[in-house]
Image (cartoon, rainbow, N blue to C red):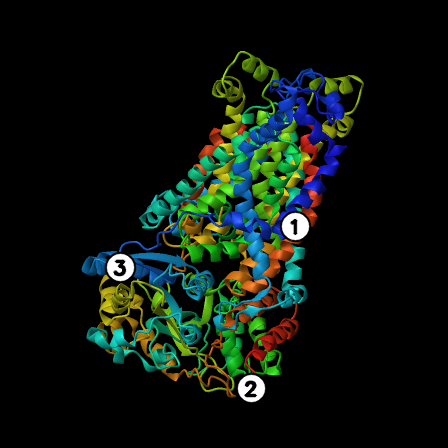
Amino acid sequence: MAATAPSTTAAAADAAPPRQTYRKHSKLNRPNPLWGVAAWAVGLLFATPALWMVLTSLHREVDAATNPPSLLAPLTLDGYRSFFGSSNAWPALINSATASVVSTLLVLALSIPAAYALSIRPVKRWSDVLFFLLSTRFLPIVAAVLPLYLFAVTTGALDQIGLLIALYTAMNLPIAVWMMRSFLAEVPVEMLEAAQLDGAGLIRTLRSVVAPVAMPGIAATALICFIFSWQELLLARSLTGVVAGTAPVFLTSFVTSQGLFLAQVCAAATVVSLPVLIAGFAAQDKLVQGLSLGAVK
Amino acid sequence: MSVSETTPQQRTVLAEPPPQQQRAASRKAGWVRRAPLVPALVFIVVMTQLPFATTIVISFISWNALRPDERGFAGFSNYAQVFTDANLRSSVVTTIVLTVVVVGVSLVLGLLIALLLDRQFFGRGAVRTLMIAPFLVVPVAAALLWKHAILNPSYGLVNGVLTWVWGLFGSSSPPQVAWLTQYPLISIELALIWQWTPFMMLILLAGLQSRPADAFEAAKMDGASPFQAFRYITLPHLRRYIDLGATLGAIFIVQNFDAVFTMTSGALGTANLPYTIYQTFFVRQDYGLAAAQGVIVVIGTIVVATFALRSASSLLKEDS
Amino acid sequence: MTARRRAPLALAALSTVALASTACGGAGGGGGGGGGGSTDGTADSISVIMVNNPQMEDLQQLTAEHFTEETGIEVQFTVQPENDVRALIAQDFSQQAAQYDVATISNYEVPFFSENSWLAPLSDYAEQDADFAQDDILEPISAGLTGSDGEIYAEPFYGESSFLMYRTDLFEQAGLTMPEQPTWQEVADLAAQIDDPNGTRGICLRGLPGWGQVFAPLTTVVNTFGGTWFDADWNAQVNSPEFVEATQFYVDLVQQHGEAGAAQAGFTECLNAMTQGGTAMWYDATSAAGSLEAEGSPVAGSIGYAPAPVVETESAGWIYSWAWGIQAASEKQDAAWEFISWASSQEYEELVGAEIGWSSVPAGKRASTYENEEYLEVAGAFAEATEAAISSANPNDPGVQPRPAPGIQFVAIPEFADLATTISQDISSNIAGQGTVQESLDRGQEAAQAVADNYK
């Protein structure tokens, strides 16, 4: 860290001793089996609704809607069959994937240079810029839906996946810049200087000095942007229809009036959540870094 | 302001140019520095500020899409309507209650669970994975799940479990609660707390694990009780993580649309601001009024955000 | 701490940009998706948005295999619950955005949609399409789908009125009989007698907010109690004694002997309750009978049908038809008509009869349906009651006083949807036990008068 910023005096005391993580709990905190039991109980309690969703999705409709619940009813894939039986299911999933992946790539392309200009070679008043960016995330999206809709109708951008991609990029960009900045702030400036004195070009400097520090940050940023884009409903619902409808929009159409539908809804909810669940489970540490805007390394 | 002006100079790594070219060079250098920032800034301004500017313009037009022949300049009449609209006022209250309750309860629960998961026990990773699941379920899926599979009065899981438990004791008339109609706002809060507690927990857990171990151990050596250690060492350390969780949580909960839309369609006093504006725009099709509502909400948000952003500023303190 | 001073500063930046950003206006011209191209697919593909009722789901199933097979026209369906689908349709049609070529509209929308030129006129199409047999459409239904200029603007998919459905087996067990033409007081008494708070409830009535949800049955109750939304001179009558009495009656009945969670129960929930034996009576759309009598329904064969209960009027049933309208801005009107002409045809009814079952036929729109032996064989239990209900409905004079606009369970003006939806949220709360009916309707009166003033 460049120990130059004047405001670090207070933090310096905090940070002066090299940060020791607290993972190795010493004799002071001997494992007590009771805590483990409590933790498992809480964990299971929180997971129950999600597990219930998956279990219900595997039941027949008649077994899904019983009181008291039938835990041990025979399993079936009917709910999933009927989900994928709808001709709109795959297009919706593909639209969601397109919007999430492309907007995530765009966010990275825009946020990495921006973060560079806010940390490694900071512009003047970089912190004001940073706050301006975050403040845009506070603005209620719903207040922008009306002009966006009118814009889309006039230009023919309505129901185009491109419009969603652009909006998701704007939605995630502020948070991405915050995250990337705090990762790039960790890049050792002395090493940058050394590389430049050696006559290394910009590209080489980036690759050998910046990249190793930044890569985990990029992964975390990408994960968060992907999750938020995948989960978005309001914009997708207002600005897409037949062609570009995403998976969450498709999900809202799943409550039918045709008698029992619980297993079907649960199957649909499970399928739609699955990509995010897998991504989040697989990269838990990145998730934490991402959610904390990179404040947690 | 002083921070922002001194810091960049001190991080300069450019070689010093000869004095006579210095001014021109430094201007050029300034632009070289700014260049990487420009695309992101231009993009964000175009995508976020421009629509709001349009909203302001529309808010002065009398424009109901269902009566296309009567469009015209409205002056402040849309705003007059906003301020006399009881529905909008009650949705302001709903939004505040919803945000405060969800963020507050999620933070407290998240802190307790984080403290629990900070201990060593068998299968800690597995429990953390279980805990994360609610946050990853797509919000509209979660809302559907809570509405139909968990809180449904006749076959939802909660009433089902009540029937089952009462059945164990031989009772045939268990309490059956119509959650969404008797406790509509609480039901929505419950579903949101379920989704946001894991979020808070993850941030706070990371905070706990970055505690400087020596201060903590020293305190214990000095005979501080576990509570004192928590109160005077852990909590101050966690402060910025709590701020962070509250700020991010507030950003998302204030804007929540999915849960209200799906679970109650804004009925029974659960309509929050995003839903009310959505309703004005989509159902009432009163574009002028919807725009005026939007402008008022943006202004309100700016005021509220002043406080939230101030707390976010503690995030910069440490790493700048 | 300098950091503390920064936030307000950033906000100043935010607010200046947000509130005075006309200066930036020039920069943004090119923003947004790069879509110069139109949203249209190929010429032989149309997009249809419809409500997710069972009849529409059958249609969705049958379209690819039959309609597309025969004509080569692909149909893309968007299906949403009723309140949502209306919002989406009104949105798309009012902007003539043409995301959807065809939409399920109704006799509520046709008068003002056609007035605003949002719908393509269909008279010429119907005339030239001899197989379609426009004359076969029931008069009360087609009248509601004709604009003030005499043009036909929509073709019915199915028509409905409302009637009272009740479980004959349960009535027999309890030794009760349903009068030939019940009054609401009689229905309330029957509900009280047959109600089992821990099992089968007395009656199911919609409580879900929405003008097309709780206010559809409720407005018919108001009509027959002698109330009305507006009098002939556009004076709002929402907190008139008759309106209040009717609403109070409805709320009391559903609270005391109605389904659990009534404030969130709509057509779907009541259909479930009736099918699962959760309720002994149900006052709702005649089209529900098809689902109740369908093969595999546990209550098939044990349902009786009585006309809509009355108080001061001779009949009280509503009239409604889900109908296909073509967006004026659609570029595929010919293909769209082909679809409509198939979906609204007699041939389609026969197809449903053969493939899915005669009780599922989208009925209530064609005279020929009620002469079809095969249909009557299966639907005999409710066919006659349905036809009688539809033909006894009079949308121009549904109450005890003259009205300023047509409609039985609604007032056919564009503001009604939002007006009634807003009030319905309060009524829903009343059903859930919050607030009083009088308060809700006093608030409603103010809103209704504000709407009526536009017409004075």
Q: Position of residue A234 (x, y in %)?
A: 50, 51
- Residue sitting at x 57%, y 17%: A192
Q: From this view, report whether residue C61 is shown above or below residue C348.
A: above
Residue at which label 3 appears: C63
Residue at which label 2 appears: C233
Mark 3 or mark 2: which is in front?
Answer: 2
Q: Quadrant of the N terminus of chain A?
A: top right
Q: Distance from label 2 to label 1 (Cα)?
A: 44 Å
| Crowding near the residue tagged with mark 3, few <14, some 14–19, many ≥20 C-alpha atoms within 10 Å | many
| Crowding near the residue tagged with mark 2, few <14, some 14–19, many ≥20 C-alpha atoms within 10 Å | few
Q: Position of residue A289 (x, y in %)?
A: 57, 29
Q: Amino acid at mark 3?
A: Thr
What chain letter is assigned to the residue under label 2? Answer: C
Q: Secondary structure at mark 2?
A: loop
Q: Quadrant of the C terminus of chain A?
A: top right
Q: Secondary structure at mark 1?
A: helix
The label number, if any, that marks residue A105 in the structure image: none
Q: Quadrant of residue C192?
A: bottom right
Q: Amino acid at mark 1?
A: Thr
Q: Position of residue C12 (x, y in %)?
A: 69, 45
Q: Which of the two residues, A4 or C126, is positioned nearer the viewer here?
A: A4
What chain letter is assigned to the residue under label 1? Answer: B
| Crowding near the residue tagged with mark 1, few <14, some 14–19, many ≥20 C-alpha atoms within 10 Å | some
Mark 3 or mark 2, which has the lower sequence index? 3
Cβ atoms at labels 3 and 1 below 8 Å apart: no
Mark 2 or mark 1: which is in front?
Answer: 1
Cβ atoms at labels 2 and 1 below 8 Å apart: no
Q: Amino acid at mark 2?
A: Asp
Residue at which label 1 appears: B301
